[in-house]
């Protein structure tokens, strides 16, 4: 058996093996099949995040469906808001995902088993929410969908270390597309008066598409493909870093990832505090959208911003992620004062600021992982990606816990009057 054939045989059993050939003939410039990997990762990003987005878009309706007594509470408070915040749905939608993300980096990387589990959980989540006859069933569906998203995100990002680094940009764009397509499809179907059950059944097509993209469209990692690197990343590669082995070695490596994790965590904390604690309290009377529709279309607007920024990394990169967290904090101040005093004269101003909020959130996500694909050696990228992807969930979980008491405190305030309306 020749040396090259022996290497290929070994790679079939261990796709993590990476052989640096003297002449890398299959660079991205000459790899004609690379479109399959890039396309597959876009679709995988879309399908993995689709259910998560739909559950957040449906949060207002889920609460309203199983809490009909809120209607009297709304009128008595004078602020026309549910006393049960959509932050409760956010916690059900993020805590299971966070728990999964915390555990996954330390488990064996059985990629096919993980993805099969993610697809099955995603389908089960839609079915449980669609056929729910009690609030606990709907929440269980949200929880299972969240677990599916967590399994998929940690696995796909870790798996991306075996492909060209541009799959990070297509994955991020796909997750942004999930935001737009998920929130828009839900809002549109509900506007067409499609029942919640039928809406969830229609969305079962996405777990099926995810399975096709992973097992049929995405190519299996090849032994002779090396990640195409820039000058900066090549400098990292020649440092001869060894793969992380064992719990102790992985645990002590985490401190090197804080520079990626902390800014991303802050951006998502501010972002989801706005979305799940304050969005529902933004209300303009006597306009072309009723209260429920305003909440849905604000989510669509936000997701459009996320999609644009997550698709832009090949055009524009920003290394200072902390700057986005500062801007997102300013957005929190605006929305917090707006829902208390109602001083914004037009909903179109709110739509513009929400779009900006989405641009910041999506930009922080994609630039963080794009930086990692350049700055961290391939031998350690799998673990690093799986760890850093947790940081947005930490921020989201903290936002959910804070959103509930803040939301309810604002609901108890005297009703505001919008004195200037355009």
Image (cartoon, helix red, strand yellow):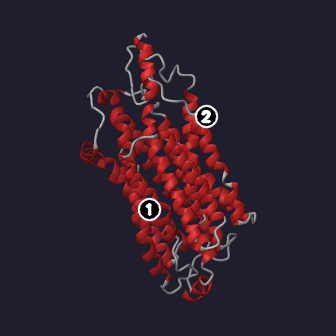
Q: Which residue is mark 1?
A: 95
Against 416, is 105 above or below?
Answer: above
Q: Earlier in the sequence, mark 1 or mark 2?
A: 1
Task: Name which residue lies at 42% across and 57% down.
Answer: 98
Where is residue 102? Give x, y as percent: 37, 53
Where is residue 164? Give x, y as percent: 46, 30
Residue 106 visible within the image: yes
Res. 216 mark: 2
CB atoms of marks 1 and 2 within 8 Å: no
Where is residue 240? Give x, y as percent: 27, 27
Q: Which residue in the rendered view is the most extreme toward the top?
A: 2
Query: Observer-nearest residue: 99 or 231?
Result: 99
- The N terminus is located in which quarter? top left
- The C terminus is located in which quarter? bottom right
Task: Name which residue lies at 28% across and 45% down.
Answer: 247
Q: Which residue in the rendered view is the most extreme toward the bottom?
A: 76
Where is residue 188? Give x, y as percent: 70, 60
Task: Tell me: 306 left or right of 247.
Answer: right
Splitting the image into 4 quarters, where does residue 136 fall? bottom right
Query: Observer-nearest residue: 317 or 273?
Result: 273
């Amino acid at each position: 058996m020749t040396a090259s054939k022996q290497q290929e045989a070994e790679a079939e059993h261990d796709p993590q093996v990476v052989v640096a050939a003297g002449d890398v003939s299959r660079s991205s410039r000459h790899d004609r099949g690379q479109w399959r990997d890039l396309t597959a990762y876009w679709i995988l990003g879309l399908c993995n995040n689709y259910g998560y987005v739909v559950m957040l878009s449906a949060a207002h309706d889920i609460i309203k469906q199983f809490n009909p007594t809120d209607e009297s509470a709304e009128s008595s408070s004078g602020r026309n808001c549910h006393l049960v915040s959509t932050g409760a749905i956010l916690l059900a939608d993020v805590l299971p995902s966070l728990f999964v993300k915390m555990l996954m980096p330390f488990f064996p990387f059985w990629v096919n088993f993980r993805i099969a589990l993610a697809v099955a959980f995603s389908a089960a989540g839609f079915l449980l929410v669609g056929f729910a006859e009690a609030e606990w069933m709907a929440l269980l569906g949200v929880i299972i969908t969240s677990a599916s998203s967590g399994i998929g995100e940690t696995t796909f990002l870790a798996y991306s270390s075996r492909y060209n680094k541009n799959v990070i940009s297509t994955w991020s764009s796909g997750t942004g597309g999930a935001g737009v397509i998920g929130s828009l499809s839900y809002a549109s179907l509900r506007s067409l008066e499609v029942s919640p059950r039928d809406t969830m059944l229609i969305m079962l097509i996405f777990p099926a598409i995810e399975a096709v993209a992973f097992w049929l469209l995405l190519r299996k990692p090849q032994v002779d493909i090396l990640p195409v690197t820039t000058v900066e990343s090549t400098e990292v590669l020649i440092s001869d870093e060894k793969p992380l082995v064992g719990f102790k070695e992985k645990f002590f490596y985490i401190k090197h990832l804080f520079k990626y994790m902390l800014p991303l965590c802050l951006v998502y904390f501010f972002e989801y505090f706005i979305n799940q604690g304050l969005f529902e309290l933004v209300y303009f009377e006597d306009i072309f959208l009723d209260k429920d529709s305003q909440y849905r279309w604000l989510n669509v607007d936000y997701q459009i911003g996320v999609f644009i920024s997550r698709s832009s990394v090949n055009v524009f990169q920003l290394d200072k992620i902390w700057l986005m967290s500062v801007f997102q904090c300013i957005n929190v101040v605006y929305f917090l004062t707006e829902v208390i005093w109602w001083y914004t004269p037009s909903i179109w101003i709110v739509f513009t600021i929400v779009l900006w909020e989405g641009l910041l959130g999506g930009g922080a996500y994609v630039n963080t992982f794009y930086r990692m694909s350049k700055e961290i050696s391939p031998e350690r990228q799998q673990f690093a990606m799986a760890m850093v992807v947790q940081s947005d969930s930490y921020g989201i979980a903290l936002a959910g816990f804070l959103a509930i008491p803040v939301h309810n405190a604002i609901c108890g305030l005297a009703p505001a009057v919008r004195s200037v309306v355009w």
